[in-house]
Amino acid sequence: MARIRILVVDDSVVIRKLVSDTLAGDVDLEVVGSAGNGRIALARIEQLHPDLITLDIEMPVMNGLETLAAVRKTYPKLPVIMFSTLTERGASSTLEALSLGASDYVTKPSKTENLSAATEAVRSQLIPKIKALCALRSPKLTTPLLPRTATTVRRRSTRRIEIVAIGASTGGPNALGEVLPRIARNFPVPIMIVQHMPPLFTRLLAERLASRSQISIMEGVAGTVLVAGNSWIAPGNFHMTVKKAGVEVRVDLNQEAPENSCRPAVDVLFRSVANLYGASALGVVMTGMGADGVRGSQCIREAGGEVIIQDEASAVVWGMPGLVYAAGQADGVYPLHQLANEITRRVLESRAPGPDVSRNNPAVAEPRLK
């Protein structure tokens, strides 16, 4: 199989060498060239025809955002991974890059890291993303990841959805930017979100989404009472869960061990929601790399709730939703532009007037937020 051809673009000679040497150590990858600024990079792309480029944000002559905009005009499908600093400015620029069409991002090793740690950071963060973005998008599973769950425990006609839990990773910021602004201001239940991102990034993402949406969107804060028509994004480096406090439900945060190499993890949120809300939970798994969300989706469905996923065609990477589908844990598959309407439809239909036998249904857990 042909190796993945990569062009490394960064104004730092040290970073170019670090990235090039690290990638060259993988038999599936080939670094075909490098560039110290965007203008040189555009010429190299035309000459070398790489399968993917890594692109620094802060560069002289032509910075990463300018370069990305130019790349997208000529090469709309070429995967681009941004290299950004773990700073407020770096996080803001990264979100802007994602909105301009960057495929994903990695954070640069800090200056305090030694060469070994920096190499490992690049290897663990960058290589899996390169392979995910350049590989065939369908998960290759011959058998389901988990046993298929019987659907008889779920009774759509008798339960009310009281919470929506969303999980996303690669491609998630833009996908959330398509879904959340289409949710009406009077949405009758709270929305909890896990987007795989480090600290700073999640707060800026929440602020960016809130500025474009009718509903309130905030970074999660421990102790916050869940209110209908509001949404919370798990802060970077913290798992987010829900817990009951008297008649209220509150946001809870912890720094327990990562799950699926992630903190925050979708599985942690989904499992918490399933335990507290049971059949009154709706899970949504969107674009992302890896398997986070599969076991959490199973928990929601075993408790009587439902899970819907983003389809392959509209996902940047169909890893997370694809594996939920392969494991038999999806109740519906929808393109990105239909997800907001489908979420709203399911929530409103579940709350329409009619016989309510859920009070005698042990699969429906308290609380009932109104």
Image (spheres, rainbow, N blue to C red):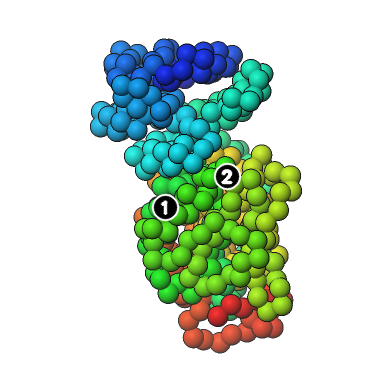
Q: Is residue 165 shown left or right of residue 255?
A: left
Depth check, front residue: 307 or 193:
193
Query: Dot 2 corresponds to which residue?
Result: 199
| Res. 26 image quadrant | top right
- Determine the residue positioned at 34% across, 39% down: 100
Q: Is residue 275 visible?
A: yes
Residue 18: assigned label: none
The local secondary structure at tag 2 comes to: loop
Alpha-carbon span between mark 2 and mark 1: 15 Å
Rendered location of residue 192, percent (x, y): 56, 61
Q: Is residue 299 visible?
A: no
Query: Dot 1 corresponds to which residue?
Result: 208
Rendered location of residue 147, percent (x, y): 68, 51
On screen, residue 365 above or below 95: below
Rendered location of residue 325, percent (x, y): 55, 49
- Determine the residue positioned at 70% across, 53% down: 254
The local secondary structure at tag 1 comes to: helix
| Res. 302 image quadrant | bottom right
Mark 2 or 1 closer to N-term? 2
- Pointer 1 local density, CA inside 10 Å: few below 14, some 14–19, many at least 20: some
On screen, residue 319 above or below 233: above
Depth check, front residue: 356 or 147:
356
- Pointer 2 local density, CA inside 10 Å: few below 14, some 14–19, many at least 20: some
Q: Is residue 271 shown left or right of residue 194?
A: right
- Determine the residue positioned at 37% across, 29% down: 64
> Which quadrant holds the C terminus?
bottom right
- Determine the residue positioned at 54% across, 56% down: 219
